[in-house]
Amino acid sequence: MVLQPGFWRVSLNRCMSMTGTNPQDRPYATEISSIFQSSPWTLVVVDDDPTGTQTVHGVPVLGDYSVDTFFREFVNKTRLFFVLSNSRSLPLEEALGRMKTIGNNLAAASKKAKRHFLLVSRSDSTLRGHFPEEVYQLSKAAGFPSCPILLIPAFFEGGRITEGDIHYLNENNVKIPVNETPFAKDKSFGFEHGDLKKWVQEKSKEKIKAEAVKSLGLEEISQGLTVIADVLSELKNDDILVVNSTCYTELEKVCLALYHHLGEGNHMLFRTAASFVSAFSGIKAKLYLPSSNIRSIGGLTIVGSYVPKSNSQLENLLSKKQVTAIAISVPRLLESDQQPYLNDLAVWIETLLKQDKEVVVYTSRELIQGKTAEESLGIGQRISGFLVEMLKCLNVQPAYLIAKGGITSNDLAVKALGMKRGLVLGQVIAGVPVWELGPETKFPGMPYVVFPGNVGDEESLTEIVSLFNNSNIPS
């Protein structure tokens, strides 16, 4: 549904000289929140894995993408909701098919409910995922063809910033171009360029030339809303604009200019990481504190992610005496007859949970890859499928469940636990959201921790388990 010009106004006549000293300072969040709450549409975030919820709270997460599900959100005038597409786990053609279904269903539900919506394609802050194809397919199916696309991969909570059109991972005040990190060597979504203009050319298989990609630089952002709005107004249909940002202060300025631009009846599409969702909605992260009630059942952590950061976090956790580790042999789970292995694992886990143990289940760490990107995705699907079946066999509800890895956390929530609608409660540590599972799930009300593979330091996983255990896990 296309918005008409003048549906609301955002003034550009203000001084915007403020600069943030802390990347997570939010000087304009209150103002943006007021604008967002009064806007006549819903912000729909289609997430290619479930980790986009890592900067917000109090918003629903949908594991179902039917017309009826979307209609209920639109007719209730939900301001913001996430849709779990899990497209990063799929080969390109399957991912595009899912985008078409989600886009068509959003358009149908919007028309039926007479509710406008804006569309965000949320993806990885380290640039992995299907781009630009899935953005084009999603936007076309949703009824927004040929709109400019804003590329905003900033994720300040995880040290992902963009400066001079180069996307960096900032760790311990050392800026590393993201193409020099292990994420760029991903078997399915690897890339060569950290310069986002060149990255767009690379990912589009040379169909979009680097010199055709537009840029909004930090100097322009520092000059205020009028300059930013001028850059936005010069965009043509199908243009891609790289938005540089190193802190929320800069990104919030961009969002205020965007509100003015949208208020003039223009439309935009967004390919972003998690920080944009928070900046554009004015919703801040919220600390989630696990209950301190005495419990009689243990907690469960399932680690499927293979990135180096996950491996170091797992190693740190396994060095502690108060956890009981169960290693799953990946070669064995890839065998055809898995049911006896699944049954034995489920009984073992249930026994330990009843003894109030902190149970850590992890896949063996040797990464098994296929000869092609598609084969590698297929192996990942089989591993994730095994973890799903294992959780389905479990008949004891853990005190909590930590799912380590984006695809792992999506499949366990949606496929194993049957989540259709969850609620983001907050973040147990920066960048790690906690959901409350709905009454339709296998374990209703259980805190569900979505722990991205590429977030935190070596001790973060141990810290979270300690918080849920209400103690410091001894070495």
Image (cartoon, helix red, strand yellow):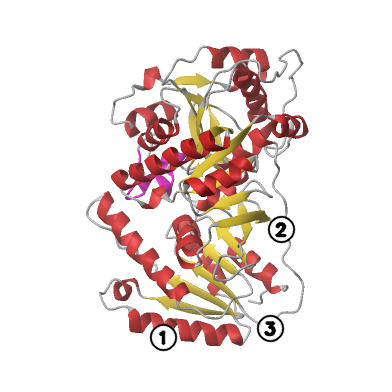
Task: Give the label on residue 344, or none.
Answer: 1
Labels 3 and 2: the sequence-earlier one: 2
For badge 3, the amino acid type reads Ser
Look at the image and give the residue range highlighted in magenta: 176-191
**Few, some or many residues within 10 Å of mark 2 (<14, 14–19, 20+):** some
Task: Give the label on residue 357, or none.
Answer: none
Name the image quarter holding the C terminus.
bottom right
**x%, y% of residue 153?**
51, 36
- The residue where tag 3 is placed is 296
- The residue where tag 2 is placed is 288
Q: Are marks 2 and 1 in contact (CB under 8 Å)?
A: no
Task: Name which quarter of the figure residue 154 lies in.
Answer: top right
Residue 342 visible here: yes
> Disc 3 to disc 2, how far (Cα)?
21 Å
> Disc 1 to disc 3, how far (Cα)?
23 Å
Q: Is residue 109 above or below residue 475?
A: above
* 388 and 323: which is toward the camera: 388
For badge 1, the amino acid type reads Asp
For badge 2, the amino acid type reads Tyr
Residue positioned most to the front: 112
